[in-house]
């Protein structure tokens, strides 16, 4: 392993093999725990080999990979760590510019990195790759953006709470769609620190979005027109009472990050709400609920 003294000059590259059936949920766990990007190396009928990228200073992220494998109850045959190395930062930047391309989502959104040109006929969501989950390339974020656009076309909203904001991608989308008060909360200080920069890159005033490092259970505010949570389904289940509490009467709760086969089990935790819209993309589901 190459020793590089300045953590800002290098990044972690971990090579793993993963069974196809576990790939989405495995990478979703990691994106919520510091993963900044992936690159597929090879694939056959059952196994995908890919690179996982973490920023320098993260500590050894192999522990996060092992933890993710444990949480989804994958065996050592289903997910294998093949290599963990430090790489010079210029290779990291080149990788992002190669693989993070503009992505159109729904009818009005364009998600893109800062080195690409904005689109004049779209709501541009500019994301600087970093610790915060959310570049639009994961199905759960894609679904959340589509559902937010669907909801805005039918019900104007002004106040929005973005729970587990990550990169701030959904807060940015809400402001583009006309929200006048957005609050973005997360338990990850690295993610919260990124939101303001992504707002500026997207051509928005950061003062329109208040960011806080806080747990929803400790968040005592007046209810919001819409509460958004793009988080793993088992965490959504644990947070159900707080998410409903933070949604105003007749307000909307937009949930994503749900493995389709776990949807019913997750929804059992939500009381006094009704399903009004559901979208699926590959193995993932996003849902809009309305509070009674």
Image (cartoon, rainbow, N blue to C red):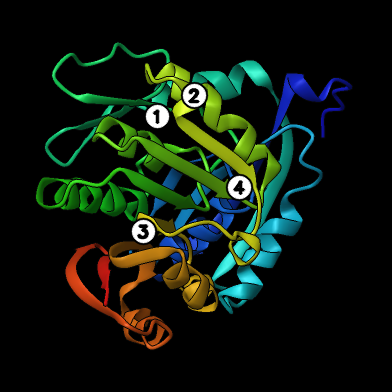
> Earlier along the polypeptide chain: callout 4 or callout 1?
4
Give the number of the disc on residue 188. Answer: none
Q: Where does the image place residue 183, in percent across and percent down from the top left?
A: 49, 43
Question: How dense is the environment of label 2, judged by Cα within 10 Å: few (below 14), some, or many (20 and up)?
Answer: some
In the visual, does 247 lie left or right of 179? right
The total number of labels drawn is 4
Q: Distance from label 2 to label 1 (Cα)?
A: 27 Å
Q: Which residue is mark 3?
A: 44
User: Could you say whether the residue bearing mark 4 is in a helix, strand or loop?
Assistant: strand
Q: Which residue is mark 2?
A: 206
Q: Which residue is mark 4?
A: 15
> Earlier along the polypeptide chain: callout 2 or callout 1?
1
- Please state which of the two labelled residues, at mark 2 or mark 1, is closer to the viewer: 2
- Please state which of the two labelled residues, at mark 4 or mark 1, is closer to the viewer: 1
Front residue of 118 and 272:
272
Q: Distance from label 4 to label 1 (Cα)?
A: 17 Å
Q: Distance from label 3 to label 2 (Cα)?
A: 45 Å
Question: How dense is the environment of label 1, judged by Cα within 10 Å: few (below 14), some, or many (20 and up)?
Answer: few
Q: Is residue 229 visible?
A: yes
> Earlier along the polypeptide chain: callout 2 or callout 4?
4
Work out whether 201 lies above or below 226: above
Question: Looking at the image, which residue is at 18% across and 53% down?
Answer: 151
Q: Where does the image place residue 81, in percent across and percent down from the top left?
A: 66, 57
Q: Which residue is mark 1?
A: 99
- Please state which of the two labelled residues, at mark 1 or mark 3, is closer to the viewer: 1
């Amino acid at each position: 392993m190459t020793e590089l003294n300045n953590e800002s000059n290098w990044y972690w590259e971990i090579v793993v093999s993963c069974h196809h059936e576990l790939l989405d949920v495995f990478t979703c766990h990691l994106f919520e725990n510091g993963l900044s990007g992936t690159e597929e190396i090879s694939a056959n009928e059952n196994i995908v080999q890919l690179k996982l990228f973490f920023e320098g200073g993260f500590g050894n992220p192999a522990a996060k990979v092992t933890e993710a494998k444990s949480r989804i109850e994958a065996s050592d045959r289903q997910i294998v760590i093949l290599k963990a190395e430090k790489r010079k930062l210029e290779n990291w930047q080149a990788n992002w510019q190669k693989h993070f391309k503009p992505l159109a989502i729904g009818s009005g959104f364009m998600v893109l990195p800062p080195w690409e040109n904005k689109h004049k006929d779209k709501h541009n969501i500019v994301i600087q790759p970093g610790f915060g989950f959310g570049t639009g390339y994961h199905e759960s974020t894609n679904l959340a953006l589509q559902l937010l656009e669907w909801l805005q076309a039918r019900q104007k909203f002004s106040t929005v709470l973005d729970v587990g904001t990550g990169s701030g991608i959904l807060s940015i989308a809400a402001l583009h769609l006309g929200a006048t008060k957005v609050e973005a909360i997360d338990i990850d200080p690295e993610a919260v620190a990124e939101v303001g920069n992504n707002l500026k890159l997207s051509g928005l005033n950061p003062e329109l979005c208040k960011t806080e490092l806080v747990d929803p259970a400790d968040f005592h505010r007046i209810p919001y027109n819409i509460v958004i949570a793009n988080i793993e389904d088992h965490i959504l289940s644990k947070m159900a009472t707080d998410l409903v509490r933070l949604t105003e009467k007749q307000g909307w709760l937009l949930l994503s990050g749900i493995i389709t086969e776990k949807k019913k089990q997750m929804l059992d935790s939500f009381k006094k709400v009704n399903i009004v819209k559901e979208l699926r993309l590959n193995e993932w589901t996003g849902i809009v609920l309305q509070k009674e």
